[in-house]
Image: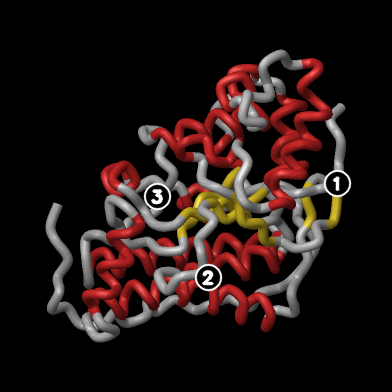
Amino acid sequence: MSNPSQGAAAPDRPNAVRPTVIPGDPPASGGTSAPVAAFREIVAAHGQRTRHLRDTVSSLFVENRDLSDYAADGGPLPDLVLVGDNPGRREWENSVYLCAAGRAGRMAHAFFDGIYGPGSFRSKVMVLNKSSYHTPRTAGLTQTLRDGVGDSAVDRAIRYDQEENARLIAEIVALLGIPVVTIGMESGGATFRDFRRTLESRFQSLGEPPARFRGRNLPSPFRKVPHFSLSKIFCRNSDAGWNAALDRFLDAWESRTPGLRTGNGNVSSKILLESRDKAMLSDYLSMVVLSMDVRGG
């Protein structure tokens, strides 16, 4: 793999026509309505844009090859969007975001496959990133942006890419009415500032379209949660609302699932994932991850 071309020119935007975003109710899977057609078009344009950056600015921009299925006529439609930080080593090697070869990817696959069925993760959960630029750790992206001092071609391309990723996500909400789960409870630093600002402004410009999940309206399409890595998404943290939702889930399920509550008051990821209990996993997604007011059944 080659290193970034530090002397490359700033990226030109691909000559893809951005379709009009048509807010509407979530369409039926495989449908051909105007929102579905627009969704497939913007996903295809997103892939084209990322390949353009990879080929003209730096080989460290990672194409998300999974999205070709969503862009295809008659392809699947996601139930939700899962947004990570930026591609790590496994994602770069495989051109697949949240790759199952990594620990966090394996855990995410096990969680969502337990809800939707074996092998369903990639068709039900669209995985995107705030940045398409690979570094082994997010701290490396922060350092790359610092070194660029707002002037290098790579620096400009990374910031442009974050803006376009944010626009894509806001438009998916408008078109499909599905929730967006951002993994990684970032502290609000400068690394993803361009992503956050653009996501907020684009969402507002679209009229702050609503989202639904399993027939229920969500108070916001956006939910920020801890990483799957190190099982943080199943643990207590400094967010009182998160901890309260986790306790509600445990109150509903621990009597039926011995060992589900750990000694630290967390959810045992081993017991939860190995149970393959669709109802219990679905409740964790709804009650804790999406913070919906439901109870275990």
* Residue beneath the point at 15% across and 74% down: 6
Q: Is residue 171 above or below residue 245?
A: below
Residue type at the position of mark 3: Arg
The location of residue 149, given as percent across then percent down, is 25, 82
Residue type at the position of mark 1: Asp
Residue 286 in sight from this viewpoint = no
Mark toward the start of the polypeptide (2 vs 1)? 2
Please report contact status of discs 3 and 2: CB closer than 8 Å, yes or no. Answer: no
Look at mark 2 in the image and give the residue it sits on: 166
Look at mark 3 in the image and give the residue it sits on: 65
Give the distance between the C-alpha atoms of the residues marked 1 and 3, in whole angstroms: 35 Å
Closer-to-camera residue (44/147): 147
Closer-to-camera residue (105/295): 295
Give the distance between the C-alpha atoms of the residues marked 2 and 1, in whole angstroms: 28 Å
Report the residue that reaches farthest toward the front. Answer: 263
Q: Nearer the viewer, mark 3 or mark 2?
A: 2
Mark toward the start of the polypeptide (1 vs 3)? 3
Q: Is residue 273 above or below residue 105?
A: above
